[in-house]
Image (cartoon, helix red, strand yellow):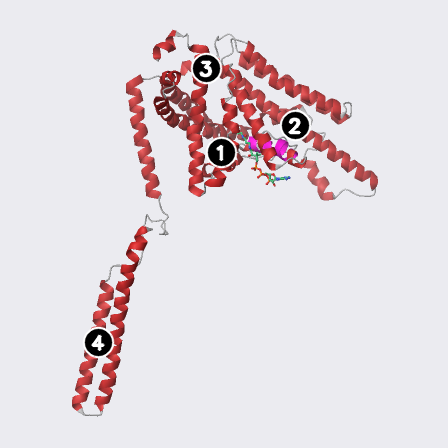
Amino acid sequence: MTDKDGFGPITRNRRRATITSAKSETVKLRNGATAAASDLKSGPKARESLSKNLQINEDSKQKCDRYDKMSCHKLQESMLSSASSFKNYRGILNWCVVMLVLSNARLFLENLLRYGILVDPIQVVSLFLKDPYSWPAACLVIVSNVFILVALYTERKLAMGSFSEKVGLLIYIFNLTIILCFPMAVVLKLPSITPVGGAFSLGVYTILFLKLYSYKDVNRWCRERTQAKARSLSRSLSCPSSPSASSTMQSHVSYPGNLSLRDMYFFVCAPTLCYELNFPRSESIRMGFLLRRLFEMLLLTQLLVGLTQQWIVPVIRSSMKPLQEMDYSRMTERLLRLAVPNHLIWLIFFYWFFHSSMNFVAELLRFGDREFYRDWWNSETITYFWQNWNIPVHKWCLRHFYKPLLRRGAGKLLSQSAVFFASAFFHEYLVSVPLRMFRLWAFMGMMAQLPLAWFVARFLRGNYGNAAVWLSLIIGQPIAVLMYVHDYYVTHCQDDPAIAEDL
Ligand SMILES: CC(C)(COP(=O)(O)OP(=O)(O)OC[C@H]1O[C@@H](n2cnc3c(N)ncnc32)[C@H](O)[C@@H]1OP(=O)(O)O)[C@@H](O)C(=O)NCCC(=O)NCCS
């Protein structure tokens, strides 16, 4: 920008000078020509001088052309200047990747030299089981079938008219409340359940809660539609059903034909939280695709475990002392040290869960809708990130919570706040209960998304907005992780001599 101002006038002066000299040549030529024309009348001497003049003009014209060819400057901006239209930064992107690989290789070596090999696949089993003869998390998952059957039974009774809508709603409220409270009570009261086992079973129950809520809503909408159709039919009995509709109905399940065990368990296993009577289905199972996803799942699970054991655990252990002593500069250093492996693991987890695992299950069930995520990595606003990173949850939020609230007359901000409040509740539920401590860090992290979304949308645009989204992910998560780990250590492990020795 400054270089434009600096070099503009010089070029302009040079240009003006060139134009003036060219003009003067023309003037000379004209003057010469007129003079020669007047001299033409005065014999051979005059003719000679005319040809001489023309020769001089030709020479100067050639000189001018040669000068133009020799000129190597033109009006232009430097490539890195924002005023230049240059956009191809592929080489710089490659440089970033090379630098990233090199700096991480250094970190990897440093980690190996300092701690040795910490990866231990057998230790992973102990994260799920304290006692190999007691599998409380697996038992909890098996018990969840009771709630599925209660929901199906209620729906059948509602469809037959044996239960009124009010009774059905009461049973659902009871069933859904127990789905959240029962595993929570078990995890809090049963000492044999590990934090990881607890988080897994609570995750399964939370998914089930969201699925059965959707099941309830969709079946109610079907009953409402059937009743509305029946009313309109009774008003005009002569109205024939269209042939095209009846032919399409043959291949489609219609209410209450969907209330079967098979349909219910298909929905429970399908990689979606939103129930539909007729899901889009793929033609067949592609074995190659299925095996590729399975291979990715196995490989990435090993990688996730290895990175956590080798990289995250030592950093977290070394962060305890600065956290306890409230040494802010060392706390910041440990936070930044944790940010890189934490973010890498989060990215791998994203691919493992939303691409490999969900596609694997979908392929196995021939479930056709594979939009489990969209391009959240291009988010220029926090809102865009939440709309695109977890599509199953976002779709559920929109269909069963956000839009019903809007339809009931709630404002957009209130509805958004309600969705984020519910999401914050579930995040806290999934972290606090397995760790057996209530600290609200996850809750606050989720609620903080609202003011952050406002700030980014208001003050940052384009690449700056995208950088803000990345920064909130890279720095925000390790802050919450450190808070929980610190509090967990203080409440559970402070007296453990093995960990105290490590500090
Ligand atoms: C809160 C949330 C649902 C808002 O979503 P959004 O896409 O920003 O919402 P918008 O206001 O843009 O509107 C979305 C839809 O509602 C519709 N809508 C908007 N105002 C409406 C109104 N007054 N009445 C009816 N519909 C309305 C829009 O037309 C749009 O419909 P479409 O999806 O068919 O295009 C979203 O941010 C979200 O999912 N947040 C939580 C995510 C989360 O917690 N994920 C957890 C992952 S671990």
Q: Are marks 2 and 4 in contact (CB under 8 Å)?
A: no
- Between circles 3 and 1, the one closer to the viewer is 1
Rounded to the nearest whole Å, what is the CA distance between mark 2 and mark 3?
37 Å
Could you say which disc has been placed on residue 58 in the image?
4
Q: What residue is drawn where x is 47% and y is 32%?
A: 288
> Considering only vertical position in the picture, is 83 above or below 260?
below
Q: Are marks 4 and 1 in contact (CB under 8 Å)?
A: no
Q: Does the magenta stretch include residue 423?
A: no
Q: How crowded is mark 2: few (under 14 residues within 10 Å), some or many (20 or more)?
A: many
- Between circles 1 and 2, the one closer to the viewer is 1
Q: Can residue 125 be seen in this view?
A: no
- Dominant secondary structure of the residues highlighted in magenta in the image: helix
Q: Name the residue under label 2.
A: 215
Q: Which amino acid does label 3 sit on?
A: Tyr
Q: Mark 3 points at which residue?
A: 488
Q: Does the magenta stretch include residue 398?
A: yes
Q: Which amino acid does label 4 sit on?
A: Glu
